[in-house]
Amino acid sequence: MTIRVGIVGISGFGGGEALRLVAGHPSFQLVYAAGEGSAGSRLADRFPGVSPKLAGLVIEKWDPDRLPALDLLFASLPTGTSAAALARVPTSVRIVDIGGDHRDAEGWTYGLADVWPDRIRGHGRIANPGCFPAATLTALAPLLAEGLIEPGNIIVDAKTGISGAGRGGGDSRFGYADSNENLVPYGLLRHVHMPEMARTIERLSSGSAAGLVFTPHLVPMTRGILATAYCRGRATTERCLEAAGAFYAGRPFVRVTDRPPQTKWATGSNLAFVSYAADPERNLVVAMGVVDNLGKGAAGQAVQNANLMCGLPEAAGLEGAPIWP
Ligand SMILES: NC(=O)C1=CN([C@@H]2O[C@H](COP(=O)(O)OP(=O)(O)OC[C@H]3O[C@@H](n4cnc5c(N)ncnc54)[C@H](OP(=O)(O)O)[C@@H]3O)[C@@H](O)[C@H]2O)C=CC1
Ligand SMILES: CC(=O)N[C@@H](CCC(=O)OP(=O)(O)O)C(=O)O
């Protein structure tokens, strides 16, 4: 079965990673690429290493009313710019929105693929989680499901590579000279991923997440997220690891590890690594989640969601090992 795929926002970091994964996917055929400033250029102009069979594909100006015959569309557009246009895409075209416009939208399913694959199978409109929620929620989900931590008292401290900001941002804090040898906290108490995390913590626990605190930090690396969550709970480290092992048993992309995970373990892959350290005497559980922000945090999870939507093997096109070193 060949699935005709389109990618809008293909010149960006998320769209470019989607291109890499779609190009290597056994059932996907890229037939449509779209954007704004990049419209008119051939894929080979933007991605000199693309395979000869895709090299001549011309990036179209994004227009949802002028799509070719498509089965699946990956949308990787700046958050805030996709909702009106994606509403015009025919319902016969499945959509995975990598951006943030539909994560709490009517008619869309929140695509936390490792946690609830059954909610995604067969659906036509999937909102991919944000990159920080992807790292954080994967680590927290087993503990919340088993009531091992209090949902209302979680502090998430996260570090991200610069590519998390996309290639479009004109903000100088993302330039080499500003980010190299620098460590920058941002979005304190108001980052958009905080409500997204809180909503999902509440869905996973049936409790209030009112006390959630989330602080992201920009670190001088290209890819990767480490989210460290400080929680209240009386479980031991072994109990947390056992809960996660049982929760993710048979799931292809989550690795439960008794070593603190490192961002490089996930680079270039759709993997998530989770680990825990707990001290019942101090009512303290530390949960750690590592992902590649462009992998599980964006295009990797988007392809996983697309596989589930299309009834394909969940891991199709995603089985390559991470890049090391
Ligand atoms: N980077 C990351 O790690 C993650 C990103 N996301 C989300 O994914 C989305 C894309 O992010 P990212 O790839 O990093 O961003 P980039 O800035 O790298 O890319 C943005 C893309 O959107 C296209 N675009 C912008 N405006 C328009 C428009 N009006 N019409 C058509 N295309 C347009 C650009 O095309 P052109 O060059 O042709 O103008 C470009 O391809 C965002 O919503 C982001 O929040 C989610 C998870 C992780
Ligand atoms: C380093 C950096 O700026 N990262 C982005 C996260 C990217 C992402 O997941 O954004 P959406 O939720 O909009 O899709 C940020 O903190 O906003």
Image (cartoon, rainbow, N blue to C red):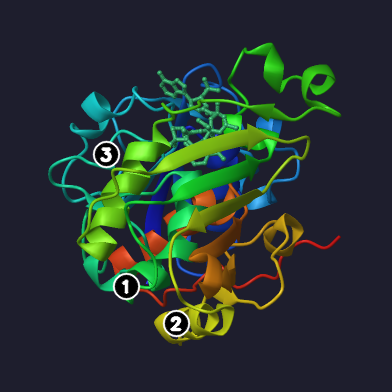
* Label annotation for residue 145: 1
Give the total number of marks visible in the rendering.
3
Task: Give the quarter of the image for residue 106.
Answer: top left
Query: Which numbered disc, 1 or 3, marks the residue closer to the eye?
Result: 1
Foreground of the two, 24 or 173: 173
Foreground of the two, 286 or 58: 286
* Label annotation for residue 243: 2
Q: Earlier in the sequence, mark 1 or mark 3?
A: 3
Q: CA gap, disc 2 to disc 1?
A: 9 Å
| Local secondary structure at mark 3 | loop
Q: Is residue 139 visible?
A: yes
Amino acid, disc 1:
Ala
Q: CA gap, disc 1 to disc 3?
A: 25 Å
Classify mark 1: residues with Cα within 10 Å, few (<14), some (14-19) or many (20+): some
Q: Judge whether 197 appears above or below 62 on screen.
A: below
Classify mark 3: residues with Cα within 10 Å, few (<14), some (14-19) or many (20+): many
Determine the residue positioned at 59% across, 30% down.
Answer: 166
Position of 308 compared to 243: left or right? left
Quadrant where the image shows the C terminus:
bottom right
Q: Is residue 253 visible?
A: no
Residue 164 x, y percent position in the rendering: 60, 36
Residue receiving disc 3: 102
Labelled pair 2, 1 in contact (Cβ < 8 Å): yes
